[in-house]
Amino acid sequence: MVRIVDCVIAYNETEMLEIRTAELAEIIDAFVVVEASKTHRYEDKPLYFSGVSDKYAQSGRTVVYYVLDDIPSAFQDRTELYYIVENFHRNSIMRPLSTMNLDDNDIILISDIDEIPRSECVQQLPDLLAEADIVIFEQIMKKFFVNNASSTCANNLPWRGTVACRYGMLKGVTPQGARLGDPFQQRAACVGGAREPRGHERIIANGGWHFSSMGGASAFDIKHSAIVEGPGGSRFGAIDGRFGRHNHSKQREEHAEIYQSFLDALAPELAEVDLADIASVHALDIPDCIKADPRKYEFLFYLKNPIV
């Protein structure tokens, strides 16, 4: 029987793993998380996902956790080459896959951890991969907060993120190659700049979500100090914290100036946003696990007042 394995590279987004495993648990046979001991700007970082294999085993989910701790030091002082560190991180997905006794016909999904495929779209993969080599998930871009309905900063544009192919093919093209396609005419992530799919590629429309820089000013600063495209430092002078857990009403009140400058620059339409009740949350296009317990995931929303 064909297995489906969901693979991600991760930084610090432990809640994104929680959401994606809830979304995909019924269709995915195993999850693979590859976490590096360095950021993509070659700075030391904690291992936020340590222990996830045991944690998820308690709920019957298989999570294979791999620590990447041998990124070549040749790139540490070469800013223009940091993208090679990111590519090395992604291609290292092959290491844990090689230990899983996979068949060449098994299906592998490759994503950044904040690119979450919709479960019903993953169910289509066996049929789609019978007629194509690569399947590309067109996901809705959601920046900063899951209820951000604005169009600022490419928010709410389609995003070609997650890709899927057979394991046999992946061994030949590498995860980075599967993600980008033709190296001489790469698939851009935002659809506005993306080329048309080749004959061996298929696009799944409405294929999930790209929850980018979730959690407000601190989450934005933390991420952009670590990724290739970021400035390598704080833009907003944001408060210390990890991912989005600091984004709640008390923190926003205590750091109102930081949040106001963040909203003014990146999401001005959010300043007056409110959701009246749980029914308003249920109307959003977001994963079911967030709808089921929005108070647990309050840090992913921007709201003037708590959800009632």
Image: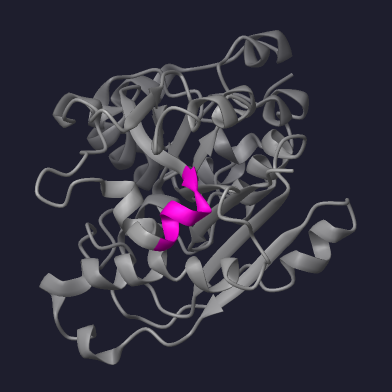
- Residue stretch in magenta: 165-171
- Camera-side residue: 71 or 242? 71
Residue 239, percent across and down?
A: 44, 59
- Camera-side residue: 12 or 245? 12
- Please state if 56 lies on the left or on the right of 8 as rendered: right
Residue 168, percent across and down?
A: 48, 55
At x 90% / y 58%, what residue is drawn?
A: 58
- Please state if 84 lies on the left or on the right of 40 as rendered: left
Q: How many labels, in total?
A: 0
Q: Is residue 228 above or below residue 5?
A: below
At x 70% / y 42%, what residue is drawn?
A: 28
Rendered image quadrant of residue 291: top right
Residue 105 seen by the camera: yes
In the rendered image, the quadrant that contains the C terminus is: top right
- Camera-side residue: 130 or 5? 130
Residue 167 within the magenta-colored segment of the rendering: yes
The majority secondary structure of the magenta stretch comes to helix
Residue 114 within the magenta-colored segment of the rendering: no
Instruction: Tell me how the rendering is colored.
Output: one colour
Q: Is residue 77 above or below residue 116?
A: below
In the rendered image, the quadrant that contains the N terminus is: top right
Residue 21, percent across and down?
A: 70, 44
